[in-house]
Amino acid sequence: GHDQERAKERIAAELDRSRRRSNGLTLDALDEAELLAQHSPLMSPLVWDLAHVGNYEEQWLLRAAGGREALRPDIDGLYDAFENPRADRVTLPLLRPEEAREYNDRVRREVLDTLDSADLGAVPGSREAGGERSLLEAGFVFHMVIQHEHMHDETMLATHQLRRGAPVLLEEEGPPQASAPAAEEVLVPAGPFTMGTDDDPWSYDNERRAHTVDLPAYWIDTDPVTNAAYLEFVEDGGYRNPRWWSPSGWEWCRGRDAVAPAFWSREGAGWTRRRFGRHEDVPPDQPVQHVSFHEAEAYARWAGKRLPTEAEWEKAARFDPVSGRSRRFPWGDEEPAGRHANLGQRALGPHPVGSRPDGASPLGVRQLIGDVWEWTSTTFHGYPGFVPFPYREYSEVFFDDGYKVLRGGSWATHPTAVRSTFRNWDHPIRRQIFSGFRCARDEEHA
Ligand code: AVJ
Ligand code: FE
């Protein structure tokens, strides 16, 4: 019917949007040598990400959902992330950039063809509680593929940040005006809230199921920790004092001789940073980014606080104390717009704290969505009743293995690839990602 037509138009538009972004970071930005090069052992050559998103789209939309034969059975192995560690991908017989473009274009033409006749099935929430999800239900598999490409676009941006050489990316937007917070911390009242979701048509398996979590009252920072605040920790000798670090954090700090966030250099009395090939003073009022979980945790201890748990982060980002409901975003259920959040790679970095008052949560917590991914103290795990869908390797194989949960998306995350339930995860030592944090603490009882 009419709703399906509208849903399909949206899907086609979002597919196109993600591809423009992928091409803008690869074929349109860099020459063949730079696309084939390994810019860091942490990252794939950009041309791998490019054909990997096309191959994933082929596997899920053409084969799994569309029932078609493989277009290139010979290349599946090359683009399997589990078969090939990132550092080895440069040695594989990868498609050249132009071949990757042709392959991706061919997949896309056939996908648009299958979309026409696809039955997007039941509307969200209409399935019986506990019933099985299906690939096409509420457009799920298309949403999965769209988000997958956007996630790789963010990964490709991290590769761009590590790359040496003349800048190639342009900033579309400068920072808006910032406003001071009413208070530095917000008290989240004790009580239950709904964590996770049963019916979000874009949600991954790991965001499900909705369940009630009852938390004691806690304080959470109104804004993410800024460069200026983080610099106090640096200048106070924070990186030389084991007192602030966990044992594994201290081992990480000593082992790599860390003295400040990644990409920072001391210059005279101050600090500069490298951002996509440009050098600039570290802006004091922006959220700190490119810190590892260990650095975030050490800062929090130094500040007399701690990192929020994942549940504390989500309650701050969704809970409406008036209705008792959990929202899709801090500001409500409305899709993210520029006034709510710094998302979608329009800027090439975080914006100052206080620059998105319209994106605040009901309790007044700000910039939870966008700007920087926020480390939480929680190890990535499955929610009660977790069911892997549609494949174990999206999230289940990472559960309970020391990965720390990050929340809220960054300036580089596309709006369709984040919401208050969205869960990201990484090794606690990683900081090439666009990661920052905010602090929390228990409510003190007199
Ligand atoms: C959810 C961001 C941790 O990039 O490693 C990409 C997403 N899964 N391809 C990642 C993902 C398959 C994943 N993260
Ligand atoms: Fe992938």
Image (cartoon, grey):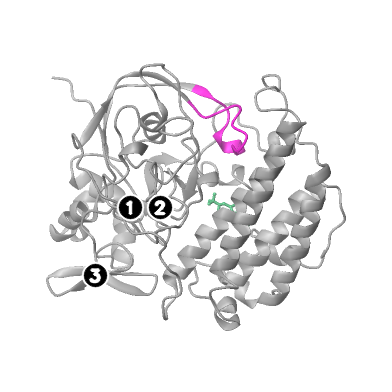
* Most distant residue in the front direction: 2
- The amino acid at mark 3 is Thr
**Where does the image place residue 348, in percent across and percent down from the top left?**
40, 61
Q: Mark 1 or mark 3: name the one nearer the start of the chain.
A: 3
**Element on which disc 1 rests:** helix
159 vs 147, nearest the viewer? 147
- The amino acid at mark 2 is Pro
Asked whether, in this view, residue 91 is left or right of residue 373, the answer is: right
**Where does the image place residue 122, in percent across and percent down from the top left?**
74, 28
Q: Is 191 rendered above or below residue 70?
A: above
Residue at the (71%, 42%) spot, across then down: 8
User: Does residue 97 appear in this view?
Assistant: yes
Residue wearing tag 2 = 428
Is 212 a magenta residue?
Answer: no
Residue wearing tag 3 = 272
Label 3 beta carbon less than 8 Å to ligand 1: no
Q: Mark 1 or mark 2: name the one nearer the start of the chain.
A: 1
* Magenta-highlighted residues: 195-211
Q: Is 268 rendered above or below residue 432?
A: below
**C-beta proximity under 8 Å, tags 1 and 3:** no
Q: Mark 3 or mark 2: name the one nearer the start of the chain.
A: 3
